[in-house]
Amino acid sequence: MRALTRYVSRYERGGFAAAIAGPYGLIVVAATVYVAISTQRPGSQGLEAIVLFAVTSPLSMLLMFLPLASLPDPLGPQISLLAFTAAGLFQAWLLWLVIRGRRRDKASGEDAPTPGPPTARPS
């Protein structure tokens, strides 16, 4: 846990990014477990998968165009479940990358200086 805290604190908004991307990743995993269990119950028509589709949106809308329904019966639902889960976890990683900000300067522990225009030196 200490290593994770150290890693997160290396970035300007690392704590905030972890507070957003982490729970989203957990929601994706929880939705996957829910769909995997509920679709195996007798009488299920697979409409529970809408939960995973909604959680992993907008990438799930792109996955709709893949011909996953044409795969053989035991393989098709498993691959589509893995594809939607991977899309959601990929989105969680993208959230982390976008929100975390720049890496802090190692020497001072402060925020890294932003590059500015070069200053003219008097001769």
Image (tube, rainbow, N blue to C red):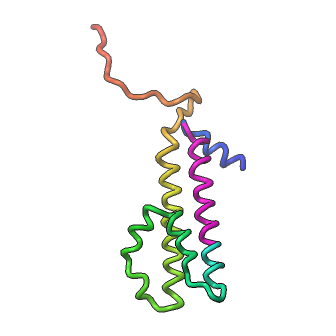
| Residue 105 point in image, percent of width and height | 53, 32
Depth check: give the residue in front, 51 or 8.
51
| Residue 108 point in image, percent of width and height | 57, 27
Q: Is residue 16 magenta?
A: yes
Q: Is residue 71 above or below residue 14?
A: below
**Quadrant in which the C terminus appears:** top left
Depth check: give the residue in front, 26 or 105.
26
Depth check: give the residue in front, 114 or 61.
61
> Which residue is pictured at 62% across the width and 54% down the height?
23
Q: Is residue 72 above or below residue 66?
A: below
Going by the picture, which residue comes out furthest to the top? 123
Side of 87 where 107 appears, left or right: right
> Which residue is pictured at 31% across the width and 21% down the height?
118
| Residue 75 point in image, percent of width and height | 51, 87
The image quadrant of residue 59 is bottom left
> Which region of the structure is painted magenta?
13-33
Q: Is residue 72 magenta?
A: no
Q: Main secondary structure of the magenta part?
A: helix
Side of 48 where 59 appears, left or right: left
> Which residue is pictured at 66% across the width and 78% down the height?
37
Q: How many marks?
A: 0
> Which residue is pictured at 43% across the width and 61% down the height?
58
Side of 36 where 60 appears, left or right: left
| Residue 39 point in image, percent of width and height | 61, 81
Side of 86 where 26 appears, left or right: right
Q: Is residue 27 above or below residue 7?
A: below
